[in-house]
Image (cartoon, rainbow, N blue to C red):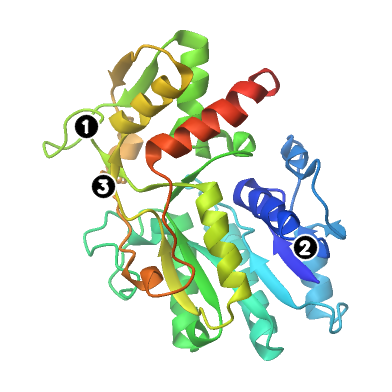
């Protein structure tokens, strides 16, 4: 049995589809469905069972699963960068991850987990996945991911597990993320509703309005990499997962307009004061580590992936968003 935490979430549900496409169905989904429509991400997909995170964690520590678990893909976490409850994040994102990692390593179970590019903070020390000690995350979410990475390294688990520092992932099934949804999703909705897109003005003289850059990666590419990591037990360590090529918000907005066949119309608005001190103006994954493994692949361009997302998913499902 494969355990997929966060299996009803954005990346989790897309990876569930990838597993199904590869013939995997003996999957235990672990997630908190809450009161929104996240459960819709599971429609049309195959899995053996589903349970909430508290029941799963209790059963795991009590030994209720015996020898049934062969691998754990741990994507479940609170990914809200504005979450202020530090104790909640320490338990949900750090202690929970630690419990799963210890369980897996003790039993020689394949363990893959989600870290985040949020661990890099403003990127003043670069975006190199071999450097950890001097990183300064900008929020508690990033800190909770960072301290788990440090715990993995301190205990030598990087030799037995695989961590993934996701950069800006976008694609199908992210509608339930609310404010944390990608700008591709938000731009599509804005264009549908108003005919234009609003982007933040620059808060730095180094960048023109809308020319702040991020490393955007399509969820389909991310899932392909994760699938190879799951199959290849020799791929261990902590890896960046982006495209390795930063693109601007203007580039992204232009790609959405083109995919929708709408003339570009961009309005630049003031950035909220609460964001100015923790806004990442530039992120770009150093992909050297992943390039040395069989999990590395040629990624879709921003324009190709936005076109696929918009035309094959967003346009078709707009009425239900």
In the rendered image, residue 318, in percent from the top left (x then y), is placed at 63, 21
Q: Name the residue rendered at 42%, 25% in the picture.
A: 256
Nearest the eye: 10 or 94: 10
Q: How far separated are the C-alphas under marks 2 and 1?
A: 46 Å
At x 52%, y 55%, the residue is 222
Residue matched to label 3: 282
Distance (Cα) linking label 1 and label 3: 12 Å
Residue 3 falls in image quadrant:
bottom right
What's the residue at 81%, 42% (across, down)? 44
- In the image: residue 128, left or right of residue 308: left
- Few, some or many C-alpha atoms within 10 Å of disc 1 (few <14, some 14-19, many ≥20)? some
> Quick one: label 2 or label 1, which is nearer the N terminus?
2
Viewer-nearest of labels 2 and 1? Answer: 2
Left or right of 146? Residue 48 is: right
Q: Say the numbered circle drawn on residue 202.
A: 1
Badge 3, how many Cα within 10 Å: few under 14, some, many 20+?
some
């Amino acid at each position: 049995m494969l355990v997929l935490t966060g299996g009803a979430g954005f990346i989790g549900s897309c990876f569930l589809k990838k597993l199904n496409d590869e013939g995997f169905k003996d999957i235990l989904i672990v997630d908190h469905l809450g009161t929104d429509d996240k459960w819709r991400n599971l429609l049309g997909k195959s899995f053996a069972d589903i349970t909430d995170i508290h029941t799963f964690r209790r059963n795991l520590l009590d030994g209720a699963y015996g020898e049934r678990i062969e691998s754990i893909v741990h994507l479940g976490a609170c990914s809200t960068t504005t979450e202020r409850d530090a104790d909640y994040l320490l338990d949900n994102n750090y202690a929970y991850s630690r419990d799963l990692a210890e369980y897996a390593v003790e039993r020689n179970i394949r363990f893959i987990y989600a870290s985040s590019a949020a661990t890099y903070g403003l990127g003043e020390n670069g975006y190199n996945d071999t450097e950890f000690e001097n990183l300064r995350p900008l929020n508690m979410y990033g800190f909770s991911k960072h301290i788990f990475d440090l715990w993995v390294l301190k205990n030598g688990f990087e030799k037995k597990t695989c961590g993934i520092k996701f950069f800006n992932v976008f694609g199908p099934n992210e509608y339930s993320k609310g404010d944390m949804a990608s700008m591709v999703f938000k731009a599509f909705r804005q264009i549908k509703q108003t005919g234009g897109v609003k982007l933040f003005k620059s808060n730095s003289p180094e960048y023109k309005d809308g020319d702040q850059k991020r490393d955007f990666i399509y969820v389909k590419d991310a899932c392909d990499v994760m699938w190879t990591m799951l199959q290849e037990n020799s791929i261990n360590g902590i890896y960046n997962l982006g495209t390795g090529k930063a693109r601007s918000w203007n580039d992204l907005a232009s790609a959405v307009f083109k995919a929708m066949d709408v003339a570009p119309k961009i309005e630049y608005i003031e950035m909220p004061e609460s964001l100015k001190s923790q806004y990442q103006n530039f992120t770009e994954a150093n992909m050297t580590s992943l390039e040395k493994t069989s999990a590395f692949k040629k990624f879709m361009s921003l324009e190709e992936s936005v076109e696929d997302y918009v035309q094959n998913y967003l346009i078709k499902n707009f009425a239900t968003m």
